[in-house]
């Protein structure tokens, strides 16, 4: 009789354990399938984003914060000109479905040259191209013209295309496409150019460069050059 009771107890305990285990497994399966759904959802979203944003373009307004860059003929700061123009370029490119546009700075802030923040920003982003915008300066105020710089060979065609567009928009003296080891050009992994739009130290060029109409035309030319290079239209 005692043996029978022990047997029944053992059997009950075994059944309880069995039920608990089946429950636990069902719970695990449920968690696994909802995690899988989440992963699928995220990768779908990623795919959609990749399709929409095929190219990452970094626009780099030169100088900023405690670094004003060139001081123009009238006392204007290069950092203000570059930011204003860069924002106009970004605004135009934002309307392109295939292009994601990123500014290294959207405000009057200082970006360290020592820690190479500008190229680092573009490299970390794995950007497809990098365009740095500047206004030029020289002791002699009669010096004028548009220059475009690149460093690595893989940046030369981007430099040529952008120079052609920008020169057409400025109508300034053609000072050519040049090779120079500026750190924003040497340290960026992707095709990168630096545009010297015109000389802020020249009275006539500065006057034009500070007007909205001129900047709008320039912004369009830079955006068109980028689109031509990326074959987006
Ligand atoms: Zn500059």
Image (cartoon, rainbow, N blue to C red):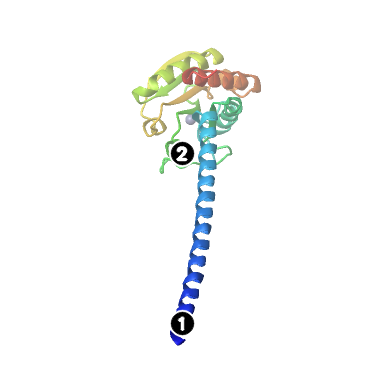
Q: Left or right of 127: which side holds 80? A: right
Residue sitting nearer the eye, 3 or 173: 3
Q: Quadrant of the C terminus?
A: top right
Q: Is residue 143 visible?
A: no
Quarter of the rendering containing residue 203: top right
Q: Position of residue 117 (x, y in %)?
A: 45, 41
Q: Position of residue 187 (x, y in %)?
A: 37, 34
Picture disc at residue 233: none
Q: Left or right of 157: which side holds 96? A: right
Quarter of the rendering containing residue 71: top right
Q: Is residue 181 visible?
A: yes
Q: Left or right of 215: which side holds 147? A: left
Q: Position of residue 201 (x, y in %)?
A: 53, 24
The furthest residue to the right: 212
Q: Which residue is mark 1?
A: 4
Residue sitting nearer the eye, 121 or 74: 121
Residue sitting nearer the eye, 189 or 163: 189
Q: Can you tell which of label 1 and label 2 is closer to the viewer?
A: 1
Picture disc at residue 121: 2
Quarter of the rendering containing residue 114: top left
Label 1, label 2: how far apart the Cα atoms are: 77 Å
């Amino acid at each position: 009789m005692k043996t029978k009771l022990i047997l029944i107890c053992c059997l009950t305990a075994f059944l309880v354990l069995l039920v608990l285990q089946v429950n636990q497994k069902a719970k695990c399966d449920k968690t696994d399938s909802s995690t899988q759904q989440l992963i699928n959802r995220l990768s779908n979203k990623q795919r959609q984003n990749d399709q929409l944003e095929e190219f990452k373009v970094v626009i780099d307004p030169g100088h900023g914060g405690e670094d004003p860059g060139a001081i123009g003929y009238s006392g204007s700061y290069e950092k203000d000109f570059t930011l204003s123009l860069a924002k106009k370029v970004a605004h135009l490119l934002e309307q392109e479905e295939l292009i994601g546009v990123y500014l290294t700075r959207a405000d009057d802030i200082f970006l360290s040259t020592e820690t190479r923040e500008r190229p680092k920003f573009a490299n970390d982003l794995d950007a497809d191209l990098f365009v740095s915008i500047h206004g030029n300066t020289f002791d002699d105020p009669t010096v004028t013209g548009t220059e475009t710089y690149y460093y690595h060979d893989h940046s030369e065609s981007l430099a040529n295309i952008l120079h052609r567009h920008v020169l057409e928009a400025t109508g300034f003296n053609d000072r050519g496409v040049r090779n120079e080891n500026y750190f924003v050009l040497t340290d960026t992994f992707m095709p990168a150019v630096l545009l010297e739009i015109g000389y802020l130290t020249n009275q006539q060029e500065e006057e034009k460069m500070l007007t909205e109409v001129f900047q709008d035309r320039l912004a369009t030319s830079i955006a068109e050059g980028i689109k031509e290079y990326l074959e987006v239209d």
